[in-house]
Image: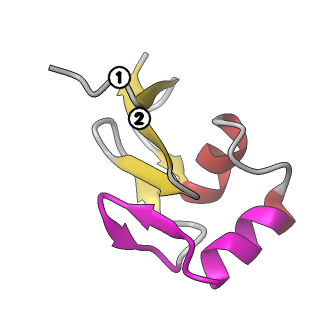
Amino acid sequence: MSNPEIEEIPIRDDMIRLGQLLKLANLVEDGVEATELIKNGLVKVNGEIEERRGRQLHPGDTVTVSGQSVRIAAS
C-alpha cells in the first residue's frame, strides 16, 4: 500500500541524479538551491542524509526535503 503523503515521480530512464530529481519534483528552483540544501544536510535519500548532488537514484528510492517526500517510479 502506498503512502498518500509521498508523491510518485515517474522517470524515463532507469536512473536519475539527485540534483535533477529535486528540480523535476519542484522541490527546488534551480541547481544552486539544490546544492545548498544538500550541502547543509537537509536532503535525505531513503531516510539517510545525502551529501552528493550526483547520487544516482533508482525507482523505489525516496527523497525527503523539508518534510516533503517523493518516491521515484518507473514510467
Q: Nearer the viewer, residue 38 or 5?
A: 5
- Regarding mark 1 in the picture, which secondary structure is present there? loop
Q: What residue span does the magenta drawing correspond to?
A: 33-51
Image position, residue 71 (x, y; %): 39, 36
Q: Is residue 42 above or below residue 70?
A: below
- Three-letter amino acid code at disc 2? Ile
Q: Which numbered marker is on residue 72?
A: 2
Q: Residue at x 30, y 63 (%)?
A: 47
User: Is residue 50 located in the magenta-colored stretch of the structure?
Assistant: yes
Whichever of callouts 2 and 1 sits on the residue coming sooner in the sequence is 1
Image position, residue 10 (x, y; %): 48, 23
Q: Which numbered marker is on residue 15?
A: none
- Regarding mark 2 in the picture, which secondary structure is present there? strand
Q: Nearer the viewer, residue 73 or 48?
A: 48
Q: Is residue 54 above or below residue 60?
A: below
- The span from disc 2 to disc 1 (Cα, nearest Å) is 14 Å
- Three-letter amino acid code at disc 1? Pro
Side of 7 relative to 23 (left or right): left
Tag 1 residue: 4
Residue farthest to the left, as pictured: 1
Badge 1 crowding class, 10 Å Cα cut-off, few under 14, some 14 to 19, many 20 or more, is few
Q: Nearer the viewer, residue 41 or 22?
A: 41
Q: Residue at x 30, y 58 (%)?
A: 46
Which of the two marks, 2 or 1, is nearer to us in this view? 1
